[in-house]
Image: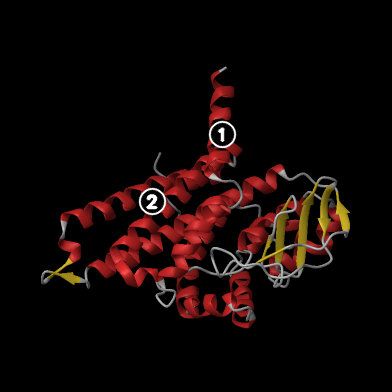
């Protein structure tokens, strides 16, 4: 099936692209990695003003949603520009709080939609992303969802921009289901990974036109072209899966989209690293900001094996 964005959705993507291009996100990511959140919070506010977080918040709580297709459009651009912060987790928190009842929702969701609140979510005792920057911390515990009162020390991560922290025990327990929130988390992760892969491909195509060997650009070599073509095909096959999943919001469809998008981004990252050569291994090269993110997103909110198992199980249920 061929998915085409309507003019309003294309304009939304273009406006986000322009906003994030002007923001110089590479410098913001590096400051965020050092624990300096000032520029990241400023960018967060601009992203919120564009309506990104409101897409997961119902209208009755001052949001614009739920609008999963537009959310996918937005997260592709966020991934393309490597925007730091607990982006997926804030969307996940919005869905969790929506199901927690009107009292909790009315108290907490307007702040999320407006960007005044930055949320993170930890799964069953795992580390929370950017718990030191978040102002709302949710822990998925056996007894339900808890509003954690604080966080522990920052832990190192594969992606320096993804700062991990344990969450403090205790806090108010919320009665809400996690299944739908997990679907939204995986959709946002898939779209973000697709954007990361597209950025890696664009940067690598530009680089192979400049880097020369034997007196000619390496982009003229057939082997290089084949690697880039394979990456392009994988990303373009993942794109309709992401938008198709956003339309159905079926758990298996979203899991399939996450596998396709994350594997395509990871494969593109490997190609980008190989074709950049030694410079691609350096943290000083901006490419590293996307390389590490592609690897981290691959296992975020369900690793490939877990998501594939869900797809296979759903296919078996439909067959019988």
Question: At x 60% / y 64%, what residue is drawn?
Answer: 52
Question: At x 69% / y 59%, what residue is drawn?
Answer: 127
Q: Position of residue 229 (x, y in %)?
A: 27, 52
Asked if residue 155 lies left or right of residue 159, the reply is right
Query: Which of the two marks, 2 or 1, is nearer to us in this view?
Result: 1
Q: Residues within 10 Å of mark 1 (few under 14, many from 20)?
A: some
Give the labeled residue for mark 1. Answer: 309
Q: Nearer the viewer, residue 206 or 103?
A: 206
Q: Secondary structure at mark 2?
A: helix
Q: Earlier in the sequence, mark 2 or mark 1?
A: 2
Question: At x 76% / y 70%, what residue is drawn?
Answer: 135
Give the labeled residue for mark 2. Answer: 235
Q: Position of residue 31 (x, y in %)?
A: 56, 80
Q: Secondary structure at mark 1?
A: helix
Which label is found at residue 36? none
Asked if residue 221 lies left or right of residue 39, the reply is left
């Amino acid at each position: 099936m061929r998915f085409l964005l309507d003019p309003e959705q294309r304009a939304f993507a273009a406006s986000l692209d322009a906003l994030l291009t002007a923001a110089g996100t590479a410098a913001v990511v590096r400051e965020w990695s050092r624990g300096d959140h000032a520029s990241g919070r400023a960018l967060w506010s601009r992203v919120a003003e564009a309506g990104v977080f409101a897409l997961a918040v119902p209208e009755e709580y001052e949001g614009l949603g739920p609008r999963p297709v537009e959310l996918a459009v937005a997260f592709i651009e966020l991934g393309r520009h490597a925007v730091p912060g607990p982006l997926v987790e804030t969307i996940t928190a919005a869905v969790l709080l929506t199901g927690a009842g009107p009292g909790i929702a009315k108290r907490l969701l307007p702040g999320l939609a407006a960007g005044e609140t930055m949320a993170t979510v930890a799964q069953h005792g795992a580390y929370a992303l950017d718990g030191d920057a978040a102002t709302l911390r949710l822990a998925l515990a056996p007894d339900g969802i808890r509003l954690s009162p604080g966080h522990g020390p920052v832990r190192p991560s594969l992606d320096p921009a993804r700062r991990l922290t344990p969450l403090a025990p205790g806090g108010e327990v919320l009665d809400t289901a996690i299944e739908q929130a997990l679907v939204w988390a995986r959709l946002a992760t898939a779209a973000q990974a697709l954007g990361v892969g597209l950025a890696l491909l664009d940067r690598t195509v530009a680089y192979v036109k400049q880097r020369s060997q034997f007196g000619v650009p390496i982009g003229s070599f057939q082997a290089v072209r084949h690697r880039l073509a394979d990456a392009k095909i994988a990303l373009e096959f993942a794109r309709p899966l992401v938008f198709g999943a956003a339309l159905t919001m079926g758990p298996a469809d979203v899991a399939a989209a996450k596998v396709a998008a994350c594997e395509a981004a990871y494969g593109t990252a490997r190609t980008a690293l190989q074709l950049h050569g030694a410079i691609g291994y350096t943290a000083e090269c901006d490419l590293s900001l996307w390389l590490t993110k592609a690897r981290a997103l691959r296992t975020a909110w369900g690793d490939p094996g877990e998501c594939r198992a869900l797809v296979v199980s759903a296919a078996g249920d439909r067959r019988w």
